[in-house]
Image (cartoon, helix red, strand yellow):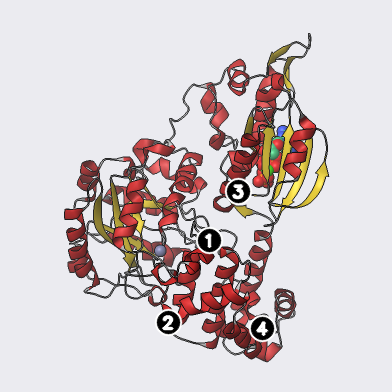
């Protein structure tokens, strides 16, 4: 029997899904993708489940996929996959990594222009060969080049939602090993920036060489780029780079402040110090004339000495936080524990992995008071959305569950699709009976600004829409935000009592931090929703809260900090 990991099994299933999709097979790709998603996030080794004969007890895994998993576990590979690889041209999966290229266009590019990787795609586009192809044109050639650029930059910056759990795990291992005294994440990951180029960690230690040995020998490490007494750099098997610095106890606070950044924030602080004839460096805050240390041990001490309240790491981007802190008017940011429920959750009724009940149980373990089920509506065919009568059936099921559930209220909802003219694909008659209506754009992202703004405003004007989901449609590192006049949307939404979503899914974070920052000028209320398609995704909430905090939002700005009674009143349900 092979020693195969869950992640390797799910990689095979994902590839199956892609290849079947390229082949044009119906339904199966979705089943494989869902199984891959489930296995990827399973806390237990699939092999153990298989040994107990319980593969089919895993949600979303039927007999056919179970037998494939069995073959993978027993032989380390899958014959069906090998056959598909033989049958289909090489490189199509790589091409499909480019946003906007589906299986059909990838196949065509391969057949007509013999393109089988991204480099070849780029050179064909630069030579103007793609515009000559039927069904492509000049515009799509430009779009391809733009998407390639985004794909390339994605290789350099990692999603916060991906890097943060890994960073915390390494922090935990160092802590438990007892080779460090104090330890903390620093840099962009401490500021919870949406993407990070690396993981910065600071620690104190009585035995730095022991610390560095332990760090460079962690099981996740692929390569050691540098190993010194005070600083080491490693690359993990997933290509993330991690820096560990061992610093002096006496200057931990200052060094911590310095390496948290951002650089722009630090430069502005240094100017403040200079105004007082002080010097701020990574070793401390000193009086320039006497060279006496003014602060350094504690991070807060530096801010205090400069006449500022301590600025939360998420705010340190030089977006005016220092000026506001000088006036003593820093916002009281929403806290990570203040969220009382999730209002954007998918289930097996559309493209989610779990039943309503399973998602509700998972929400309960997070201490939530409520959760709204917002499955996709019918036109989103790839997500197998609810038809016109779907919501009615779901409301009944939710009522039944609510009678039984204790400690959590399930709200009924839907994520309706806003079509290219702003029309919704579920009738008002149905929408009015739901507690929560999220309306989102899922297609025609390239419309001109005026058209897109009108389109979204049409949805905002609908009497039953509560929330605009992922308002710019961006996918970090993959799809640019659509062109939309957000200030206008904020203004009208606020007037009509419609809320804007911070979609907390790691590759969305949409609204972004800077858009949240702008929304404050309009008094716009925000909903943080995870868009969970799996129970483990509910934990993305903290990424949404981080985005809100980076956007200077307070508890009062975010509707899902309200208790159920107040929330229902606000939703008019
Ligand atoms: P990243 O890694 O691109 O996601 O962003 P950061 O902010 O983590 O940047 P990084 O890793 O290059 O440096 C970590 C922190 O160290 C940074 O936030 C501030 C500080 N730092 C680095 N270089 C400089 C510098 O040249 N001047 C100042 N004032 N601070 C710096
Ligand atoms: Ca960094
Ligand atoms: Zn959506």
Q: Quadrant of residue 179?
A: top right
Eye-nearest disc, 1 or 2: 1
Does 256 sit above or below residue 537? above
Percent of width and height locating residue 204? 70, 27
418 to the left or right of 444: left
Distance CA(mark 3)–CA(mark 1):
19 Å
Distance CA(mark 2)–CA(mark 3):
34 Å
> Which label number is shown at residue 166?
3
Q: Earlier in the sequence, mark 2 or mark 3?
A: 2
327 to the left or right of 415: right
Q: Which residue is mark 4?
A: 130
Distance CA(mark 4)–CA(mark 1):
45 Å
The answer to whether residue 362 is visible is yes
The answer to whether residue 447 is visible is no
> Which label number is shown at residue 45?
1
536 to the left or right of 172: left
Q: Which residue is mark 2?
A: 27
Distance CA(mark 2)–CA(mark 4):
30 Å
- Residue drawn at the location 74% of the way across and 25% of the way down: 206
Task: Check disc 1: other Cα within 10 Å, few if <14, some if 14-19, many if 20+.
Answer: few
Q: Earlier in the sequence, mark 4 or mark 1?
A: 1
> Which label number is shown at residue 505?
none
Percent of width and height locating residue 458? 32, 63
Q: Are marks 1 and 2 in contact (CB under 8 Å)?
A: no
Eye-nearest disc, 2 or 4: 2
Distance CA(mark 4)–CA(mark 3):
40 Å
Does 486 sit above or below residue 98? above
């Amino acid at each position: 029997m092979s020693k195969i990991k869950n992640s390797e099994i799910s990689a095979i299933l994902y590839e199956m899904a892609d290849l079947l999709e390229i082949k044009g097979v119906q339904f199966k790709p979705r089943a494989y993708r869902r199984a891959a998603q489930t296995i990827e996030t399973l806390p237990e080794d699939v092999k153990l489940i298989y040994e107990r004969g319980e593969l089919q007890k895993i949600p979303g895994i039927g007999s056919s996929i179970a037998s494939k998993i069995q073959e993978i576990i027993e032989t380390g590979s899958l014959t069906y996959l090998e056959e598909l690889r033989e049958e289909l041209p090489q490189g199509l999966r790589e091409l499909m990594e480019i946003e906007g290229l589906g299986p059909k266009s990838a196949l065509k590019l391969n057949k007509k222009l013999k393109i089988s990787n991204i480099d070849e795609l780029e050179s064909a586009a630069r030579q103007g060969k793609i515009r000559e192809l039927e069904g492509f044109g000049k515009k799509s050639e430009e779009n391809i080049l733009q998407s390639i650029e985004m794909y390339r930059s994605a290789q350099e910056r990692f999603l916060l939602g991906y890097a943060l759990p890994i960073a915390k795990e390494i922090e935990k291992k160092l802590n438990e090993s007892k080779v460090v005294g104090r330890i903390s994440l620093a840099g962009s990951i401490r500021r919870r920036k949406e993407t990070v180029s690396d993981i910065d960690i600071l620690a104190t230690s009585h035995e730095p060489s022991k610390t560095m040995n332990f760090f460079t020998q962690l099981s996740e490490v692929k390569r050691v780029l540098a190993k010194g007494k005070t600083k080491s750099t490693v690359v993990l098997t997933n290509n993330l780079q991690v820096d560990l610095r061992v610093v002096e106890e006496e200057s931990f606070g200052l060094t911590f402040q310095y390496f948290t950044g951002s650089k722009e924030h630090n430069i502005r602080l240094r100017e403040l110090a200079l105004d007082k004839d002080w010097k701020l460096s990574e070793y401390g805050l000193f009086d320039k004339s006497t060279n006496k240390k003014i602060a350094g041990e504690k991070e807060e001490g530096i801010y205090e000495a400069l006449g500022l309240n301590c600025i939360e790491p998420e705010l340190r981007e030089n977006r005016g936080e220092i000026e506001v802190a000088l006036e003593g008017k820093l916002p009281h940011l929403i806290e990570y524990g203040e969220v009382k429920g999730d209002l954007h959750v998918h289930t097996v009724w559309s493209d989610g992995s779990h039943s309503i009940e399973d998602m509700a149980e998972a929400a309960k373990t997070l201490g939530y008071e409520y959760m709204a089920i917002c499955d996709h509506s019918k036109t989103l065919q790839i997500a197998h959305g609810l038809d016109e009568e779907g919501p009615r059936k779901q409301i009944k099921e939710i009522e039944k569950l609510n009678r039984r559930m204790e400690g959590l209220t399930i709200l009924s909802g839907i994520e309706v699709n806003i079509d290219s003219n702003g029309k919704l694909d579920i009738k008002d008659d149905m929408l009015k009976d739901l507690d929560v209506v999220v309306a989102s754009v899922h297609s025609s992202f390239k419309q001109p600004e005026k058209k897109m703004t009108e389109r979204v405003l049409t949805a905002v004007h609908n009497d039953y829409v509560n929330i605009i989901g992922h308002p710019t449609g961006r996918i970090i590192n993959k799809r640019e935000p659509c062109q939309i006049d957000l200030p206008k949307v904020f203004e009208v939404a606020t007037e009509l009592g419609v809320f804007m979503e911070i979609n907390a899914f790691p590759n969305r974070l949409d609204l972004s931090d800077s858009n949240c920052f702008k929304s404050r000028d309009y008094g716009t209320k925000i909903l943080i929703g995870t868009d969970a398609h799996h129970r483990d995704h509910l934990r993305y909430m903290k990424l949404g809260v981080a985005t809100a905090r980076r956007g200077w939002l307070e508890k009062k700005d975010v509707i899902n900090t309200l208790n159920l009674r107040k929330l229902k009143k606000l939703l008019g349900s």
